[in-house]
Image (cartoon, rainbow, N blue to C red):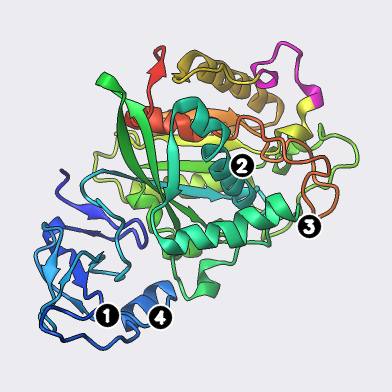
Amino acid sequence: MPSLLACPYCYETFATREIMFRCNGRLSRTNISCALRTDPVLVQRMGIQRDLGPEFKADGRKGTAACPDCGGETTYRICPICHSTLPVQFGVVGSRMIAMAGAKDSGKTVYMTVLLHELRNRVGDRFGAAIMGADEETRKRYEISYENPLYDDNRLPPTTQRAAQQDNRVVPLVFRFSAARGLGNRPGHTLLSFFDAAGEDFGDQESVDVNTRYLASADGILLLLDPLQMAGARSLAVPGIQLPGSGPLYETPLNILSRVTDILLARSQRGPRAKISKPIAIVFTKLDAVWHNLERVSPLRAHPPEGQKFDVADCLNVHEEIRHLLREWEGGQISQILENHYARYRYFGISALGQPPTESDFAAPSGIQPYRVADPLLWMLSEFGAVPKTGKG
């Protein structure tokens, strides 16, 4: 087990023994029950305001503890920093923090919604995997605020609020991912924590430093870049498509990558010449907007191979194709930054909707037809050993 754990909700680190407990508020064996109340730390940190049992310190290495006030036994373990209830088996199963970053209008929220939907359906069936919300808040919020509006009402989600507008609260969606692996196909379990940061939170160095603590704690990063925010690709877009805006709120992909890299280098504990070791997936969204420019034999025109293992050769073919396209899109500096500063990175091209939306607030008119949306996460999980892979590279 690692010496320090990272909370999947606030991304602060702590030792296992520092984990606190919360009384369940039920009648104990001694016929005493603790009064329920709001937790000011939980309100301030996470914006969650509901009546709960009191929190208390105990040996966090154990799965249960007795409340010092009522004597009742509780299994509710909480983060000692933000007081969020930790997922079942936290610190026992693998816990992978996946940070998602990108510029304004790069499609992060739509991508996350479609990705999780695919993991729960087609991709889950393919890999014999199951994904479920790790807490009741995640389960309700994902369905009500993300999945239902997009899949039932065909409406795009509203622009993500800046962290500064949320009193610096970090409220990620936390899921438990289980997939068969290893001898006897025993299921492996991984906790995935997704934080959908507003694009504006990467618009200047000050807001990046204040609002993206999770980048340093993350085990892997999904960096979403919109090719239509690059001069070379913008001129190749399908006629009539709605192009992203311009101005100070719309940072270029190069600037976003540069600022993320600066943060990771500044917080790295390795030597000044060492490359960043955590894997980063460079995900070019809205591939449908430039689809017509791709060669018929382009790997980006082919669907990923079927099977219960992540195909490394296919991933590398896509990687090399996008590396080639970057020169055409005037993105050569992106390649240079990644080559010089990252030990593990891959390029991906995806389309969350499968076609450009017809209006600003409506999704695909003929239904959502995602293309390669799971590739970046599956590559990352294969790097962690959470899903099996075939091939080398």
Residue 225 - label: 2
At x 22%, y 53%, the residue is 5
Question: Residues at badges 3 and 2 in contact (C-beta under 8 Å)?
Answer: no
Cα distance in 3D space between marks 1 and 4? 10 Å
Amino acid type, label 3: Asp
Q: Which mark is residue 50?
A: 4
**CB contact under 8 Å: marks 1 and 4:** no
Q: Secondary structure at mark 3?
A: loop
Reading the image, the residue beneath label 1 is: 53
Tag nearer the camera, 2 or 4: 4
Residue 220, x across and y down, in percent: 40, 41
* Picture quadrant of residue 198: bottom right
For the N terminus, give its image quadrant.
top left
Residue indicated by mark 3: 361
| 80 relative position to 285: left or right | left
| CA distance for labels 3 and 1 | 41 Å
> In the rendered view, does 176 fall on the left or right side of 93?
right
**Marks 3 and 1, the one that precedes in the sequence:** 1
Q: Secondary structure at mark 4?
A: loop
Sequence order check, earlier mark of 3 and 2: 2
Depth-wise, is mark 3 or mark 2 nearer the camera?
Answer: 3
Whether tag 2 and tag 4 are in contact, CB under 8 A, the answer is no
Please name the residue shown 29% across and 60% down the image. Answer: 86
**Which range is magenta?**
292-302
C-alpha distance separating marks 4 and 3: 33 Å
